[in-house]
Image (cartoon, rainbow, N blue to C red):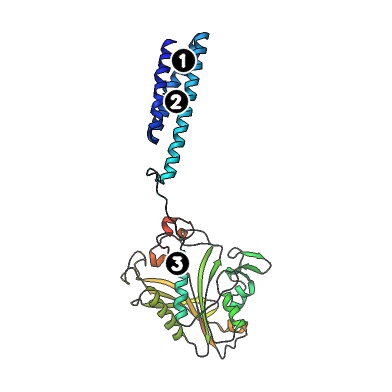
Amino acid sequence: MRDLLAALGALRERLTEIPQADQRRLQDLKTEILGRKAGALTKILAQVPKLDPEPRRAVGAAANELKREFEAALAARERALARTARASGAADLTMPGRAAWTGGLHLVTQVTGEICEIFHEMGFTRAVGPEVETERNNFTALNFPKDHPAIDAQDSFYLGGDLLLRTHTSPVQIRTMERYPPPIRVVIPGQCYRRDPFDASHSPIFEQVEGLVVDEGISFVDLKASLSAFARKFFGPTTRTRFSPSFFPFTEPSADMAASCSVCGGSGCQTCKQSGWIEILGSGMVHPAVFEACGVDPERYTGFAFGMGPQRIAMVRYGIPDIRLFFESDMRFLAQFSTP
């Protein structure tokens, strides 16, 4: 009993250390005196139950009183340190830094805006339309045959009746030609939806930019000149273009356009799969059946249309290997391309 009371007396003297302790020393004192496993006072309290009744009451009362004194002194010193820190405005240099996030445009939004701006300089007006479309505007008026696989529910998102989420921005071409008489020169950005797998190169939701020109005397020469001028403006003045035959229900003739690889300059690399060329867009002369569906005289007017994917173009331009990176909200990726 005497040994325990003597130990309590020695501990009481350490109360004088608390008023001068800084934050780190205060934490050390709390651990040394009141720590659950190795605290000096904790060890004394652990021996109290082993004493006889009379000594147990005396030592227990003294130990508990001392514990309350230490707790009160430690709490008072913590409050004093907190007041001092607030008054001085001092920063806690042990705290990790906070990132100053700023908002910015998504990379796909930037690329879409750049594409539209280039065509705006060529005299194109921006046009938009609803993302929920009729089957007529999305397929029938665009000369899709009734047995075309894109019309099936396994490829398109139907909402009931003849309504569906548009699979391309081409329905805006139909709406534009039905609303405005030629001449027409529009560029059409927007989101589209298809039942595609979500993998490294496909997404069920994606951006698309289309263009439409309708006037008297429009030829394939105008198509090639306009799209080649776009490629040089977007990828660089030395960019070469190549057109190859293709097929789309709403254009005839149809062509895919490829641009010389901006990474290797056309010599061949991993980006262009050693070919020197990267396919950029699909295009063609507007099919007479599309004109007839919109009430435009195909004997008087001709035109061309084109469509491209800003996400694919962004992947090519910046060497992005996986389309899913655009959707994952990973700030480490997005911040590389963010502009206010």
Q: What element carries label 3?
A: helix
Position of residue 216 measured from the top left corner of the image (x, y, whole percent): 52, 90
**Where, quadrant-wise, is the C terminus in this rendering?**
bottom left
Q: Report if the CB atoms under discs 1 and 3 are less than 8 Å apart.
A: no
Residue type of the residue flagged with mark 1: Gln
Residue situated in front as seen by the camera: 45 or 84: 84
**Disc 3: which residue:** 312
Q: Is residue 284 above or below residue 264?
A: below
Position of residue 59 measured from the top left corner of the image (x, y, whole percent): 48, 14
Q: How crowded is mark 2: few (under 14 residues within 10 Å), some or many (20 or more)?
A: some
Position of residue 53 measured from the top left corner of the image (x, y, whole percent): 53, 9
Q: Report if the CB atoms under discs 1 and 2 are less than 8 Å apart.
A: no
Residue situated in front as seen by the camera: 101 or 180: 101
Counting residues from the N terminus, which is met first, the one under dot 1 or under dot 2?
Answer: 2
- Looking at the image, how many numbered discs can be counted on the residues? 3
What is the spatial separation of the Cα atoms under label 1 and label 2, in whole angstroms?
15 Å
**Disc 2: which residue:** 34
Q: Residues within 10 Å of mark 3 (few under 14, many from 20)?
A: many
Q: In this view, does 47 lie above or below 259?
A: above
